[in-house]
Image: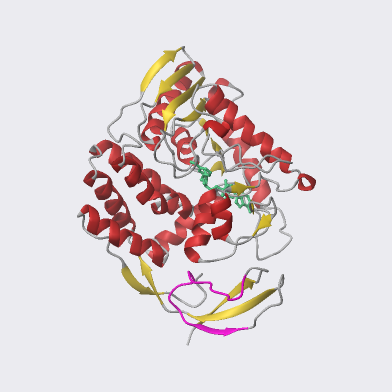
Amino acid sequence: MALRCYRLFLTQNQSVLRPLDRGQGELLLITRPAVGNETKCHYSVGPRLITPIEEARRFMTDCFLAVGTPKEHAEIVSENLFEADYRGHYSHGMNRLEMYIRDIQHNSSDAKAVPCILKETAATALVDGKNGLGAVVGERCMALAIKKAKEVGIGFVVARGSNHFGIAGKYAMQAIDEGLLGMSFSNTSPFMTPTRAKTATLGTNPLSLGAPATKGDSFVLDMATTAVAVGKIELARRKQEPIPEGWALNDQGMPETNPTIAYKSAKLMPLGGTEVNSGYKGYGLGMLVEIFSGILSGSAYGPHIRKWGQADKLANLGHAFMAIDPSAFEPGFEDRLSDLLNYARNLEPADPAKPVLAHGDKERQHMEKVKKDGGFRYVENQHSTNDKLAKELKVKPMESKTVNLPADDD
Ligand SMILES: NC(=O)c1ccc[n+]([C@@H]2O[C@H](COP(=O)([O-])OP(=O)(O)OC[C@H]3O[C@@H](n4cnc5c(N)ncnc54)[C@H](O)[C@@H]3O)[C@@H](O)[C@H]2O)c1
């Protein structure tokens, strides 16, 4: 029988080790570690459920259409969620489908809304998202920033009246597709506790910079300004896995590793974690995103944004998008960027098994894995959520196939 090996970490709060997401293989052997130590366990490699790429897209689009979303908007938002899964950010992909559907059903967001320009110069625009889908607002705003960058070298567009816009990198890559540099920012519901505070005040406020290099290569920095995106805690909760120390605090302001308690207390640590580890720099980056997204646009900001999951108040989120034409500067941008990216990638790694990466490489590797698998490996919980949603919305359930994967294939 084929075996697969995993590392486990036992924390103070755990009495049982349950790494449930590791396929449907059977746990064969486990050496229980001392608290705070790592151990290895072995699984038989069982069959995995694989959802073909096009089927995932089809299912999400059908769900949006079923709640009255215009086809064009349904395709934009499905593509946004799809891209998150494809790039390995499962927290921001199909994991968000039910939340977006509920927002539409409860009129918390307007799937039909078309964003409009309130104010404009050659290089800037202020947009009202009209409480539309964040992915639609984002796609339109970045398209406008790109148009301006092609005309005058730079375009900077901010939006208010929007909703959750998914992965920030999607908009940066929209600019890369046009040979431009792209940046995107969004404020979000308060989750981050500023250094020295006990109250969540800023969101996970993501930012992204995408830049084109040669031969289709690119740099894509796409990150939350908290230690992690809240979706990662949500996903750990779905998988019933502990979270590492340094991600979140509990209500007493102490580091928490239980994902259910951490999700409830809703107090994420800024990037960097504690003050001694320079967490105040992550706090500063979160402020930077808030200044571009919320303060410039006149959207809700910081602690005034509705709480995560609160349905009786509009989100009124703010975003910012920048596109820059490299040809407005020194020629040869793409060549120099490729040179730098490859220099970094070719550095001798500290661990030979872990080559040095450039930002965006991890996601590229994940895309290759998805292609090799012929689809997505969604966690079991995602399948059951989808089945219920399909039944309720009367759409064709998502079809997946059972595949036996080789032993060395994680
Ligand atoms: N819309 C929202 O409200 C919201 C809020 C927070 C986060 N997000 C999204 O969640 C996603 C996940 O965010 P995250 O902060 O957890 O991302 P992450 O920590 O997984 O990755 C952050 C960045 O680091 C790069 N990276 C990872 N490992 C690397 C390595 N070894 N060497 C070099 N680069 C490496 C990645 O390519 C990526 O650009 C992002 O797409 C983000 O936009 C969205």
34 relative position to 98: left or right: right
Percent position of residue 38, x then y: 68, 73
The residue located at (23%, 52%) in the rendering is 393
Which residue occupies the foreground of this view, 128 or 214?
Answer: 128
Is residue 354 covered in magenta?
no
Percent position of residue 235, x then y: 49, 58
In the displayed structure, 50 sits above or below 297; it is below
In the displayed structure, 408 sits above or below 321; it is below
Percent position of residue 234, x then y: 50, 55
Percent position of residue 69, x then y: 25, 39
Is residue 16 covered in magenta?
yes
Q: Residue furthest bottom?
A: 1
Q: Quadrant of residue 395?
A: bottom left
The residue located at (74%, 60%) in the rendering is 350
Would residue 245 be seen by someone viewing this image from the given angle?
yes
Which segment is the magenta one? 14-30
396 relative position to 45: left or right: left
Would residue 147 be seen by someone viewing this image from the given angle?
no
Magenta-colored segment: predominant secondary structure: loop
